[in-house]
């Protein structure tokens, strides 16, 4: 089975292999939940892998094939070849992100990367060239993975000895840059031991690859320094959860398809319809961008996590924020979707975000007026009068909206839609029957 790669990309891979004394290549792909899966080949197998891919058993991967149709092929993308900076320089280790194919060479319907590629193709058929994404992933450092012992008592943007993780972030940025990921800035986040490193925006597929790489790098560097990093959405009661605020824009060539000089909000009709589409379908896609039971411990009012389905220019309590236009910054016009968490599957999340926006453009959804008041300070009655709805309160409720969504089914395809729904329903059902320490502490002494 041959795969057509750009010869220059292939040549560059072999140049890098020779120049860096590469002996091992890790083949990366993700399961349906966004967890990175990997197996390793030696450099002697590289040429065959580039031409024919490497076979593996898909029945053992979460959400992939059943046992009777388990043969899969991992086809490495030469554009994703990177040396792993935390491995030895002698007999070095590289990685390549793979597309998952069926044995005959057809893209596998259960591969999240393919779902994003397919959605991007639909975007191009609608006349757009780029879906740019700039996600801000927050995470925590703890002493180990057995508990939530914090490393510092720092707060937002702290630059003091309280932020003992400065060296950790520094080492992480160096590693990210060596992996070809451009970093804009880093800082201590609001909660103790919570941090953020922001990647510079890029095309959605590149950025989804970067997100899974970012998560691996953050964890590897933390391990090297004897601590544990987690992207769990809400690990500490009473402190802010970790989000992934995601900046996004559509471009036609070099022109920002979101910017208009003539509109009061400096938004084109397409931009307004795109934002309206994401607001309209927010409940349906919530199970994808907030896919864990724990995600909904973060999505509650009062902790900077937007739960109210509205948009604004200045109000960070809204689901979507459109930053105010600054003259000369036309290309920076964008919509910030604020509810995804950093533990989502970025391929599926970016796919459903894009599909919802495109649905708004295709059907010319009307964008409601922006809400500039702090939504957390409004009463339930006031929000109802303004027509402001909320995201689902838990994974079970989110799955009800997801299950009934024709758009989610169409975007993800029958294979992923059905398997994702089954996996997440199992998770929700298992969670529902747990008896927690809170219940025991509250009820056991009095009932």
Image (spheres, rainbow, N blue to C red):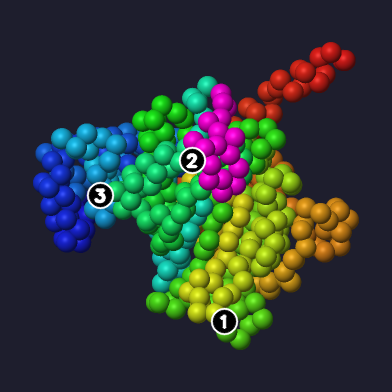
Which class describes the residues within 10 Å of circle 1: few (<14), some (14-19), or many (20+)? some
Q: Is 233 in front, or is 5?
A: 233
According to the picture, the residue beneath numbered tag 1 turns out to be: 260
Q: Secondary structure at mark 3?
A: loop
According to the picture, the residue beneath numbered tag 2 turns out to be: 33
Image position, residue 430 (x, y; %): 63, 27
- Relative horizontal placement of residue 396, taking residue 84 as reference (left or right): right
Residue beneath the point at 56% across and 54% down: 245
In space, the residues marked 3 and 2 are separated at their CA atoms by 23 Å
Which class describes the residues within 10 Å of circle 3: few (<14), some (14-19), or many (20+)? many
* Mark carried by residue 81: 3
Image position, residue 422 (x, y; %): 56, 37
- Relative horizontal placement of residue 302, taking residue 177 as reference (left or right): right
| In front: label 3 or label 2 | 3
* Mark carried by residue 91: none
Q: Which residues are magenta?
A: 147-164
Name the quarter where the C terminus is drawn. Answer: top right
Residue 78 visible, this orientation: yes
């Amino acid at each position: 089975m041959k795969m057509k790669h750009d010869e220059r990309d292939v040549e560059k891979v072999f140049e890098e292999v020779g120049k860096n004394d590469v002996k091992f290549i890790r083949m990366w792909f993700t399961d349906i939940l966004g967890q990175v899966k990997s197996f390793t080949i030696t450099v002697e197998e590289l040429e065959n892998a580039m031409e024919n891919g490497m076979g593996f058993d898909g029945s053992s991967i979460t959400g992939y094939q059943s046992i009777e149709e388990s043969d899969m092929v991992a086809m490495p993308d030469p554009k994703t070849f990177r040396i792993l900076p935390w491995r030895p320089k002698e007999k070095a280790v590289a990685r390549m992100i793979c597309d998952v194919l069926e044995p005959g060479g057809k893209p596998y319907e259960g591969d999240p990367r393919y779902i994003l590629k397919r959605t991007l193709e639909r975007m191009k058929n609608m006349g757009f060239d780029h879906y740019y994404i700039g996600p801000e992933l927050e995470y925590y450092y703890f002493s180990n993975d057995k508990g939530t012992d914090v490393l510092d008592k720092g707060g937002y943007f702290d630059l003091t000895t309280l932020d003992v993780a400065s060296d950790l972030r520094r080492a992480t940025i160096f590693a990210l840059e060596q992996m070809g990921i451009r970093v804009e800035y880093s800082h201590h986040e609001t909660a103790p031991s919570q941090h953020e490193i922001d990647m510079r925006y890029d095309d959605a597929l590149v950025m989804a690859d970067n997100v899974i790489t970012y998560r691996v790098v953050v964890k590897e560097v933390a391990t090297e320094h004897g601590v544990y990093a987690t992207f769990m959405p809400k690990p500490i009661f009473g402190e802010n959860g970790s989000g992934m605020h995601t900046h996004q824009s559509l471009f036609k060539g070099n022109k920002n398809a979101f910017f208009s000089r003539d509109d009061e909000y400096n938004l084109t009709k397409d931009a307004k319809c795109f934002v309206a589409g994401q607001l309209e379908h927010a409940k349906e896609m919530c199970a994808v961008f907030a896919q864990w039971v724990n995600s909904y411990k973060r999505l509650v009012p009062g902790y900077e996590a937007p739960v109210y389905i509205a948009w604004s220019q200045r109000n960070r309590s809204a689901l979507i924020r459109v930053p105010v236009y600054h003259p000369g910054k036309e290309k920076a016009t964008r919509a910030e979707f604020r509810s995804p968490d950093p533990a989502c599957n970025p391929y599926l999340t970016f796919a459903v975000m894009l599909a919802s926006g495109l649905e708004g453009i295709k059907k010319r959804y009307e964008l409601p007026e922006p809400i500039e008041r702090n939504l957390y300070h409004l009463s339930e009655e006031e929000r109802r009068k303004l027509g402001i709805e909320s995201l689902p309160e838990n994974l079970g409720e989110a799955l009800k909206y997801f299950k009934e969504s024709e758009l989610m089914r169409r975007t993800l395809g029958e294979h992923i839609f059905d398997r994702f729904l089954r996996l997440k329903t199992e998770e929700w059902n298992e969670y529902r029957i747990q008896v927690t320490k809170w219940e025991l502490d509250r009820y056991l002494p009095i009932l």
